[in-house]
Image: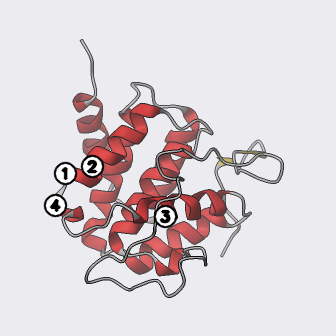
């Protein structure tokens, strides 16, 4: 597996959050909330041990993708956090999801961004934990997060491009999802 991270590979510029450049950590997801067990999902044996991508539930994976897209431009905006919260609180795919897990999932994403192959690990976890029928759902959620603040930044677009490639999404379906997200987030 190649070592991939956010960035423009042709110019050698990188967006990965390396040493000296920690990923931003939103207070909403990083408080001292107690980790609770999601009913019907694998329980964490030790809440003091960080959540690994291989421990993700399908819902955790969807949250991780949204957090990754939000953090990809190194500035997590309030509108993006509110969009993630709205999606988790209202979409049927999250009906049995424990929102307290979002803190641990977010911290795992930030830790992955600090690793050279962190994005590879996220895509691998996505392919292992998320049913293929939910790949377009994940892409739609990611597009909603990107569109939430009204501006699609270059780094966010690169992450979406990488997501299309890694999950082998149909280009026409992806274009339709992107257009719908833009339409939903337009302002007068």
User: Of the residues under marks 3 and 2, which one precedes in the sequence?
Assistant: 2
Where residue 147 appears, as percent x and y from the top left, is 37, 33
Cα distance between the residues tagged 3 and 4: 19 Å
Residue at disc 1, secondary structure: helix
Q: Residues within 10 Å of mark 2 (few under 14, many from 20)?
A: some
Q: Farthest residue toward the right?
A: 20
Q: Residues within 10 Å of mark 1 (few under 14, many from 20)?
A: few
**Residue at screen point 50% across, 40% down:** 157
Say whether marks 3 and 1 touch (CB < 8 Å): no
Q: Which mark is residue 105?
A: 3
Residue assigned mark 2? 87
Cα distance between the residues tagged 1 and 2: 5 Å
**Residue at screen point 21% across, 70% down:** 96
Cα distance between the residues tagged 3 and 1: 19 Å
Q: 186 or 43, which lies in front? A: 43
Cα distance between the residues tagged 4 and 2: 9 Å
The quarter of the displayed image where residue 175 is located: top left
Cα distance between the residues tagged 3 and 2: 15 Å
Residue at disc 3, secondary structure: helix
Would you say 147 lies left or right of 72 here? left
Q: Which mark is residue 92?
A: 4
Say whether marks 1 and 2 touch (CB < 8 Å): yes
Q: Which mark is residue 90?
A: 1
Where residue 119 appears, as percent x and y from the top left, is 60, 62
Residue at disc 4, secondary structure: helix
User: Of the residues under marks 4 and 2, which one precedes in the sequence?
Assistant: 2
- Is residue 173 visible to us here? no
Would you say 66 lies left or right of 86 here? right
């Amino acid at each position: 597996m190649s070592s991939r991270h956010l960035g423009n590979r042709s110019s050698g510029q990188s967006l990965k959050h390396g040493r000296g450049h920690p990923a931003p950590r939103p207070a909403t997801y990083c408080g001292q909330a107690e980790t609770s067990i999601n009913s019907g999902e694998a329980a964490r044996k030790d809440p003091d041990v960080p959540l690994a991508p291989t421990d993700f539930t399908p819902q955790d994976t969807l949250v991780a993708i949204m957090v990754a897209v939000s953090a990809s431009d190194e500035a997590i905006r309030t509108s993006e956090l509110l969009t993630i919260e709205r999606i988790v609180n209202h979409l049927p795919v999250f009906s049995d999801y424990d929102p307290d897990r979002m803190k641990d999932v977010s911290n795992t994403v930030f830790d992955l961004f600090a690793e050279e192959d962190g994005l590879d690990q996220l895509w691998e976890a996505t392919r292992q934990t998320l049913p293929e029928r939910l790949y377009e759902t994940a892409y739609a959620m990611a597009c909603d997060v990107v569109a939430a603040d009204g501006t699609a930044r270059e780094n966010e677009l690169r992450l979406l491009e990488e997501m299309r490639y890694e999950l082998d999404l149909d280009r026409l379906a992806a274009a339709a999802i992107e257009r719908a997200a833009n339409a939903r987030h337009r302002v007068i």
